[in-house]
Amino acid sequence: MSIKIKRCTLNQAKELVKKLVKENGLPHNENALKDKLLWAFVELGEASDAFKKGKDWMDVTEELIDVIFYILDFIGLVEDLKGFKIDVDKVFLDKWEKNMTRFAKKAI
Ligand SMILES: [Mg+2]
């Protein structure tokens, strides 16, 4: 069955990544934690490489999305291992607000 999802929040994306990991039997345990972060770096390297080689912007963007996948995968794994939820939308917006304040102070 194919479900075409058009839009999602970061929290929804995190759940979609969990579904992807579960349905494909990908590692989802304590030992996998460090690998998730390592793979995020690998994917960032792939994005950098695609950029340096002048590849299509969508190719570069897709590699950057891979980074987000691994970051959300890491956060989702932390949730499951530690038994609590992390509201990544809230964390993102709180951090955005913090950065906005920080840069606004610099401009003065
Ligand atoms: Mg990739």
Image: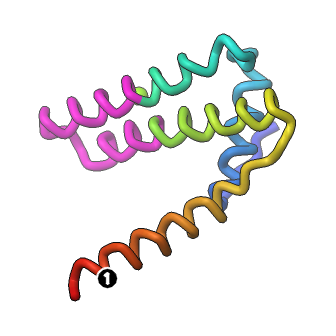
Q: Tell me if residue 58 is in the magenta stretch.
A: yes
Task: Return the x and y of residue 39 as percentages of the image width and height.
Answer: 46, 23
Please name the residue shown 77% across and 34% down the image: 19
Q: Amino acid at mark 1?
A: Ala
Asked which quadrant contains residue 25, the reply is top right
Q: Is the residue 8 above or below the residue 66 in the image?
A: below
Please name the residue shown 24% across and 78% down the image: 106
Task: Return the x and y of residue 28 as percentages of the image width and height.
Answer: 73, 20
Q: Tell me if residue 106 is in the magenta stretch.
A: no
Name the outermost residue toward the top. 31
Q: Residues within 10 Å of mark 1 (few under 14, many from 20)?
A: few
Which element is circle 1 on? Answer: helix
Give the quadrant of the N terminus.
Answer: top right
Please name the residue shown 21% across and 83% down the image: 107
Is the CB of mark 1 within 8 Å of ligand 1? no
Q: Taking the image as four quarters, which one is ligand 1 found in? A: top left
Q: Nearer the viewer, residue 78 or 68?
A: 78
| Left or right, residue 54 beside residue 6 | left
Please name the residue shown 77% across and 37% down the image: 79
Task: Return the x and y of residue 5 as percentages of the image width and height.
Answer: 69, 55
Q: Which residues are magenta?
A: 41-66
Which residue is under mark 1?
104
| Left or right, residue 11 beside residue 60 | right
Name the outermost residue toward the right. 83
Asked which quadrant contains residue 67, the reply is top left
